[in-house]
Amino acid sequence: MSDARVTLYTRPGCHLCEAAREVVSRVCDDVGESFDEVDITTDDELEDRFGEDIPVTFVDGRQHDFWRVDEARLRAALGV
């Protein structure tokens, strides 16, 4: 099991996912946290759950954002 506080659910070829990855990566690097990225196309259950509402960001196991990641809000959720 990963110790990452942030999980980013994505799919290949998604421009919003690419933008979200940049924000999540920058914030996590800045605050010393790790993140996991999960491709929902590899899991039918995740595909059904999230569908077109990707990217989806979870922090500490709870849904935080979808479609776009607000950098200030993510930093606040991580306590910085």
Image: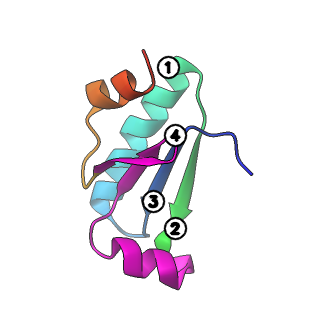
The disc label shown at residue 39, or none: 2
Look at the numbered disc 2 and give the secondary structure of its residue: strand
State the separation of the CA atoms marked 2 and 1: 24 Å
Examine the structure image and report whether residue 4 is included in the region drawn in magenta: no
Q: How many marks?
A: 4
x then y, percent, for residue 19 = 32, 47
8 left or right of 16? right
Image quarter of residue 80: top left
Q: Amino acid at mark 3?
A: Tyr
Q: Which mark is residue 30?
A: 1
Say whether disc 4 or disc 3 marks the residue closer to the N-terminus: 3
Residue that sits furthest to the top in the current view: 80
How far apart in space, not on screen, are marks 3 and 2 (Cα)?
A: 6 Å
Determine which residue is flagged by label 4. Answer: 60
Whether 60 is drawn above or below 12: the answer is above
Distance from disc 4 to disc 2, alpha carbons, whole Å, reads 19 Å
| Mark 3: few/some/many CA within 10 Å (<14, 14-19, 20+) | many
Dot 4: element: loop
Residue segment shown in magenta:
41-65
